Amino acid sequence: MRRRPVLWLLMLLALPRAARAQEPPAELQGSLPGARLLGSGRLRFMGLHIYDARLWAGTPPPGSDWAATPFALELIYGRALSGERIAERSLTEMKRQGDIAEPVATRWLATMKQLFPDVKEGDRITGLNVPGSGARFFVNGALRGEPRDADFARVFFGIWLSPRTSEPALREALLGGKAP
């Protein structure tokens, strides 16, 4: 009988942490009104935890025309990675969606190398889709850059949301399906 109060106390202490996990990152407060967690998942490569991804959306949530909807993709890194490697892998994944002219690919790679710093475990990169305009990127809550290129934003976020993604289970989890 004496264990029940302790158990209840532990459960109550755990609630605020769980509730915080459902709150959008502070950097989205003014940019994505009514943001709510649409879905989340974890990316692993050869068994290694690379990052946890969370998709935040307002109303309406992204559907088949996700590029025309404001949303934010938050990546919380599970390990240290170089910003250059993140940019290079992003371009590789962007090319899976279709041909990208070499001058465009070169420009986008340079943009991503400026946007993405080296990360360590626990660091967050949040990308906000700004339909028709481009994107905004935040690193650990601080604005890092705003590429004003709607094509870049569409193809970049397509890494996770396009039907041509290399991680269809993660896509499904982000769009509100089952976690991979």
Image (spheres, grey):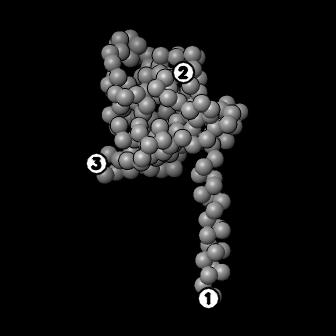
Instruction: Check whether the beta carbons of the residues at disc 1 and disc 3 lie within 8 A of each other.
Output: no
Q: Does 100 appear above or below 162?
A: above
Q: Does 42 appear above or below 155?
A: below
Mark identifier at residue 68: 2
In three-dimensional space, the C-alpha distance between marks 2 and 1, rounded to whole angstroms, equals: 56 Å
Q: Which secondary structure, mark 1?
A: loop
- Mark earlier in primary sequence (3, 2): 3
**Number of residues whose C-alpha sits closer than 10 Å to that of mark 3, classed few (under 14), some (14–19) or many (20 or more):** few
Asked where in the image residue 99 lies, by quadrant, the reply is: top left
Q: Residue at x 43, y 22 (%)?
A: 155
Q: Residue furthest right?
A: 30
Q: Residue at x 40, y 28 (%)?
A: 162
Q: Does 107 appear above or below 16?
A: above
In the rendered image, residue 112, in percent from the top left (x then y), is placed at: 47, 26
Q: Which secondary structure, mark 2?
A: helix
Q: Residue at x 60, y 84 (%)?
A: 3
Residue nearest the observer in this picture, 29 or 65: 65
| Relative side of 18 to 162, left or right | right
Residue on which the image places disc 1:
1
What type is the residue that disc 1 sits on?
Met
Q: Does 85 appear above or below 12?
A: above
Dot in front, 1 or 3? 1
| Res 112 visible | no
Q: Which secondary structure, mark 3?
A: loop
- Mark earlier in primary sequence (1, 3): 1
Mark identifier at residue 46: 3
